[in-house]
Amino acid sequence: MNPAQKLPPKAWVHALPQSRVPRPAVLVDWPKYLLWLVITPVHPYVRDSLTYLGVLRHKGRQHYLLGKLAATETFESVISYLIDQGFGNHFVAWRDEGEIASLRKVPDFRHQFHIRFFQDGEVRGHYEYTPEFRPFDHLLEIGAEDRRQEFLEVLGDRIIPA
């Protein structure tokens, strides 16, 4: 990793604007939307506690490698750029090994573009159901798609494609 790519302070990452899921367009999705308004603030604590106790397991990194952070960029510059593009901090997601930031862009209630940054400069991203719409499909990665080209178009020369 380039020395210019030092890790951003945890406080900076936690202060990033939170990702917000849009209101559902279909009436049948409203109960799920309302439920997640209530459980979102406590979800990370429950997830982390259940993982610590061994009830839930998550190891490694998800698939869909996009590339590495370009030597001319810093984590903060690329993450700030993505925030300007409509991404937000996705603190509800699993924490992959070595992850420093998880962002998502939510075009509608049902889908999201999810991108992760790692300590070694690696960048991974995929398109999937939101946990709010289909929590179990989301958890099991059912319906997850590569969408590599779309991510690379947004990121441009900020990363070196894998």
Image (cartoon, rainbow, N blue to C red):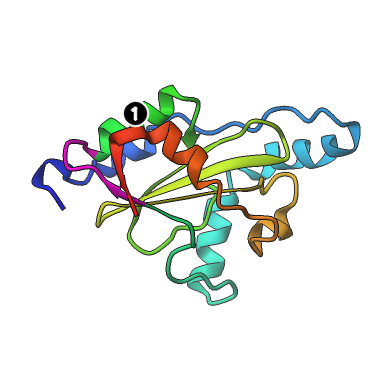
Residue 65 belongs to the span the image colors magenta? no
Q: Residue, x 50% and y 26% (percent of image)?
A: 86
Quick check: 8 left or right of 118? Answer: left
- Mark 1, other Cα within 10 Å: few <14 / some 14–19 / many ≥20: some
Residue 135, image x, y percentages? 71, 54
In the image: residue 9, left or right of residue 95: left
Residue under label 1: 80
Answer above or below: position of 155 versus 161. above
Query: How far across and how far down the image is residue 153, in percent?
Result: 44, 34
Q: Position of residue 94 (x, y in %)?
A: 51, 57
| Residue under the image location 63 percent in, 55 percent down | 144
Q: Seen from this angle, which residue lies furthest bottom?
A: 54
Question: Measured along the vertical axis of the image, is residue 143 above or below residue 52?
Answer: above
Going by the numbered disc 1, the residue's amino acid type is Ser
Where, by quadrant of the figure, is residue 50 drawn? bottom right
Closer-to-camera residue (73/99):
73
Which residue appears farthest toward the top when viewing the image? Answer: 84
Residue at 90% over, 38% down: 28
Name the residue nearer the viewer: 24 or 10: 24
* Quadrant of image for the C terminus: bottom left
Q: Observer-nearest residue: 70 or 108?
A: 70
What SS does tag 1 mark? helix
**Predominant secondary structure in magenta?**
loop
Task: Residue 72: say if magenta.
Answer: yes
Q: Which residues are magenta?
A: 67-74
